[in-house]
Image (cartoon, helix red, strand yellow):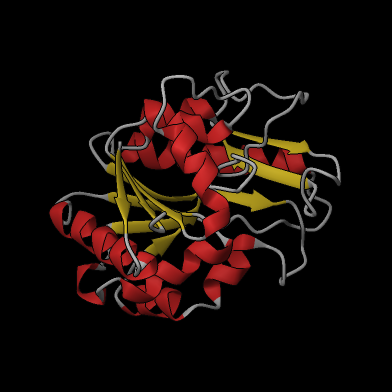
């Protein structure tokens, strides 16, 4: 894991993502994007590296039909998404259908991910990830929940208390998926409030049970872009 500190975190992270996409442009790529503020780094991705060899989806989702909250819907409203479509990039939607439960939505998403991997066993999975000041990453929060982030599932749905996060119903890829299948990671962690968890990541005592972002230490080829101290 490499930690890169910059006064231009979005730009550095976006250019690093461009470089990864350029390096792997001869093979199928599954590009999985974190929502929220991490979308801002996409403005710095060179559209020349985009093409039909890329399949685009999100890394975690909020179980909701509210377009103002739903991550994939928010992604579709970005200029980056428009550039992707113009250059033939394919997508895996996480849209929640009418009467579809969180578990059903998670299973449908997992089926799509497994289908991509089966079709492209030598394909590369590249992800952007964020880190919360509380140490969460993707849609994984610390605490005891009725799901197993380290089990066989690639995607799970679950509910967090309101004091943990304002968006309580979640769908997310698991530790298992992140550790086993994601090949390269760009982490966007801008802001002074992230500095404590970034420091913890750089220690041997970093534990997933307390700080889910510690999974980054177990993943392949991770580049963390953060604000200088």
At a point 63% along the width and 51% down the height, the residue shown is 61
At a point 34% along the width and 70% down the height, the residue shown is 8
Q: Quadrant of the C terminus?
A: bottom left
| Front residue of this view, candidates 18 and 225 | 225
| Front residue of this view, candidates 51 and 45 | 45
Q: Quadrant of the N terminus?
A: top left
The image shows residue 17, relative to residue 43, as above or below, that is: above
Q: Position of residue 89 (x, y in %)?
A: 34, 66
At a point 32% along the width and 66% down the height, the residue shown is 14
| Front residue of this view, candidates 176 and 40 | 40
The total number of labels drawn is: 0
Q: Position of residue 198 (x, y in %)?
A: 46, 42
| Front residue of this view, candidates 167 and 225 | 225
Left or right, 19 with reference to 208: left
Left or right, 43 with reference to 33: left
At a point 58% along the width and 63% down the height, the residue shown is 36
Left or right, 76 with reference to 7: right
Residue that protrudes farthest toward the front in the picture: 229
Residue 107 image-quadrant placement: top right
Residue 68 image-quadrant placement: bottom right
């Amino acid at each position: 894991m490499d930690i890169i500190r910059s006064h231009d975190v979005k730009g550095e992270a976006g250019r690093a993502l461009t470089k990864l996409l350029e390096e792997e442009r001869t093979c199928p790529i599954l590009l999985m994007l974190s929502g929220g503020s991490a979308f801002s780094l996409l403005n710095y991705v060179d559209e020349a590296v985009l093409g039909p060899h890329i399949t685009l989806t999100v890394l975690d989702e909020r179980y909701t039909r509210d377009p103002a909250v739903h991550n994939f819907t928010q992604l579709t409203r970005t200029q980056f998404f428009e550039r992707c479509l113009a250059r033939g990039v394919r997508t895996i939607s996480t849209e929640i259908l009418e009467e579809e439960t969180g578990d059903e939505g998670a299973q449908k998403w997992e089926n799509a991910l497994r289908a991509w991997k089966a079709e492209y066993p030598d394909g590369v999975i590249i992800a952007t990830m964020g880190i919360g000041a509380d140490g969460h990453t993707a849609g994984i929060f610390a605490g005891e929940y009725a799901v197993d982030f380290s089990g066989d599932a690639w995607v799970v749905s679950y509910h967090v208390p309101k004091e943990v996060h304002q968006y309580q119903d979640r769908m997310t890829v698991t530790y298992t998926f992140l550790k086993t299948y994601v090949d390269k990671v760009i982490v966007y962690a801008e802001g002074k409030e992230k500095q404590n968890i970034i420091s913890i990541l750089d220690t041997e005592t970093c534990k997933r049970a307390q700080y889910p972002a510690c999974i980054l230490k177990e993943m392949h080829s991770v580049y963390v872009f953060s604000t200088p101290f």
